[in-house]
Amino acid sequence: MKKKVLIIFKAPWHWNDFAIKKFEKFYDVKHIFLNKIEKSFLKTINEINDLIEKDKIEIVIFDVDYQKFINHYFIKKIKNSVKIMMTLDDYERHNFNLITANSCNHVITACPISAYKYKEVGKDASFIPLESDGKFYKDLKIQKDIDVLFFGKVNKDRKNFLDYLSKNGINLKVVGNNSENRVLDTELVNLICRSKIVVNFSKTTWGKIMNIPEKNVFSYQYQFKGRIVQAGLCRTACISEYAPQHNLMYKNDELIQFSTKEECLKIIKDFLQNPNKLENYKAKFSQKTIDTYEDKKILLSLNKFIDNKLLNKEFQKKNILNKFPYWYLRICAKQIILRDINIYKIFSSIFHLKEVFSLIKGSNNFVKLLIVIESSLNILWFSLIRILRKKGVGKNRYADEY
């Protein structure tokens, strides 16, 4: 009988189905969306715990990306022996996630370097790409009538590359530029299979809503992108902009990389002018991807980890933290207060100060004083803000505050 898994998502997104189907290969999967539970911090936890008890859930997976409500204290109150943190965009909130992970038995991340960062501090972690379903992304064995394909968001840097390829005679097809030419996932598989080469870009530019220190210091960082795995599973060649993650996943001749638009053009022209060379490269790249990063291959180790260690109680959560930093405590305190704040529920909000007192237990008196004062002010301030917002006063600046 399959073990029962509950995945807690922030909200419905198209990629949720990929995560659900991924774990359905080994588990009986249920899922919920936190934005559908319009309750306070404690009542939300109680509803989830009731579901876990009712359905006899054995494993809970927490989607922590861009979810400011899931923190160490939230996860700690969830009733279950096996808790797994899942992060697909760890680069933005790694420092926060690193603390939150202390409440979990294991971390799943879509970046191989990220997995090593967790292991670096003694936290067990696995690299599991999202787009690795070999039953969905597969070779449709159709004619390859597209020379080069790019799919994904076209930002300023990527546009510079793509325009350069087009101006130099490359037959290029671009899909998925935000909502302008987005295609369904099934249509995307068809386009990948019709393409001779998929080009991948690795630089991640910071969005306006990202609140991370690196944003103000660096223009970009290199990130692993699932396009590489998607292309390989469809048995289509992929060349990629450099990223250090690639060197952990492929040998130099298994994934060819470029750094400049000139290098990108040179590689593409060479392959298109030498079909046999392209065919040999495609075979090597695709086979490595299928043999190593397809779902059943990469999930097998996680499944064995859970069976042999967690559920057999051979492994307990490792307490790897000496203390919780002040910045983490004040963020968590704010999340608890803001979950269901309302001037008409002011006494309920004050009641949640009890949870704030719980999380600052053990801190020095100065930290306790600062967090209690800030939490009290947050109750008053954001209650007022939400009243004004309901009356249409001012812009909706605080809609994503938690």
Image (cartoon, rainbow, N blue to C red):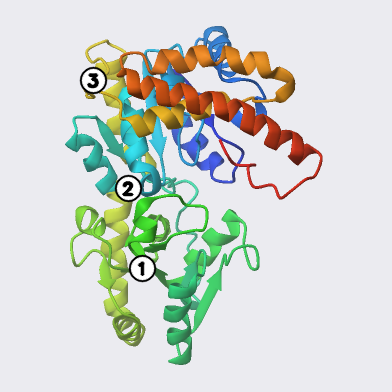
User: How crowded is the residue under tag 1: few (<14 C-alpha within 10 Å), some, or many (20+)?
Assistant: many
User: How crowded is the residue under tag 3: few (<14 C-alpha within 10 Å), some, or many (20+)?
Assistant: some
Q: Circle 1 sits on which residue?
A: 237
Q: Circle 2 sits on which residue?
A: 111
- Label 3, label 2: how many angstroms apart (C-alpha)? 22 Å
Q: Helix or strand or loop: what does disc 2 sit on?
A: loop
Amino acid under disc 3: Lys
Foreground tag (3 vs 1): 3
Label of residue 318 in the image: 3
Which residue is depicted at the point 65% across and 42% down?
A: 399
Indicate the quadrant where residue 340 lies: top right
Give the mark, 3 or 2, whose residue is nearer the N terminus: 2
Amino acid under disc 2: Cys
Q: Helix or strand or loop: what does disc 1 sit on?
A: strand
Regarding residue 355, the answer to whether it shows in the image is: yes
Picture coordinates of residue 376 (x, y %)? Answer: 55, 23
